[in-house]
Image (cartoon, coloured by chain):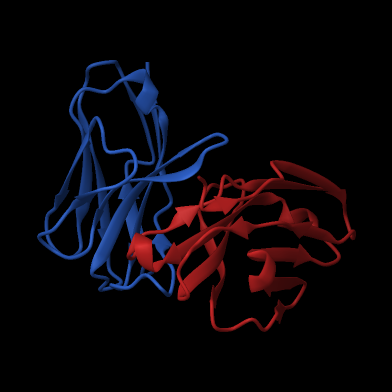
Chain colours: A blue, B red
Amino acid sequence: NAGVTQTPKFQVLKTGQSMTLQCAQDMNHNSMYWYRQDPGMGLRLIYYSASEGTTDKGEVPNGYNVSRLNKREFSLRLESAAPSQTSVYFCASSEPTGIYGYTFGSGTRLTVV
Amino acid sequence: AQKVTQAQTEISVVEKEDVTLDCVYETRDTTYYLFWYKQPPSGELVFLIRRNSFDEQNEISGRYSWNFQKSTSSFNFTITASQVVDSAVYFCALRDENTGNQFYFGTGTSLTVIP
């Protein structure tokens, strides 16, 4: 099925460990996004990529890096995980203007202990 | 200041009751887009509706209806004859010219429909 695929679905890290969350879309969308969802705070934008080769910071970029590997793939890296990064992470994609809404992946539940 | 406010954190209704989820937004742009997403207990985010600022017609889709009022900066969502399957977290979101193609999401309203 066409859509946005995120891996892994669940992950437990120890403080200080690193990991990369993978995201791939087959919607032929130019724009991709990483959000985190925390209780009572809705979804907050971490980083986005308006097109292949470009990335920009969102509302909460500290502690994260991203790579737009090609048009399909947009990865999120935690270099040194902290308990404050325990969250549910969503990848999304959209056509360039975003006016038709996002297509979201199924989410990654990350716990940092 | 929050661009999108969903003041109702949690709502519980008994099955078959009607329920309205409120969404108030803030923007200075004349062109903007509003969205509702549903997040069922399984966790995925499901697109429900998009409305642009030039179209104030209310929309009905089965048991779902949306009331867009620019005068009060509101985009409320009503579920008629609620069902247990409607239990979910519902998010309202805004895309305006200032945010480019980014969205601002509200904090969500958790709806529980009691059988």
Q: Position of residue A40 (x, y in %)?
A: 57, 36
Q: Residue at x 63, y 72 (%)?
A: B70
How many numbered dots are placed on residues in this image? 0
Residue B115 shows in the view: no
Residue A109 shows in the view: yes
User: Is A45 rendered above or below residue B18?
Assistant: above
Q: Residue at x 26, y 23 (%)?
A: A81
Q: Residue at x 9, y 60 (%)?
A: A53
Is B22 displayed left or right of A101 in the figure? right
Is A111 displayed left or right of A66 in the figure? right
Q: Position of residue A2 (x, y in %)?
A: 36, 70
Q: Position of residue B85 (x, y in %)?
A: 73, 56
User: Is B61 rendered above or below residue A49?
Assistant: below
Is B91 displayed left or right of A24 in the figure? right
Residue in front for this viewpoint, B62 or B90? B90
Image quadrant assignment for residue A18: top left
Q: Position of residue B35 (x, y in %)?
A: 54, 66
Residue in front for this viewpoint, A83 or A98? A98
Image quadrant assignment for residue A70: bottom left
Q: Residue at x 38, y 69 (%)?
A: A1
User: Is A92 rendered above or below residue B108?
Assistant: below
Residue in front for this viewpoint, B104 or B13? B104
User: Is B17 rendered above or below residue B112?
Assistant: below
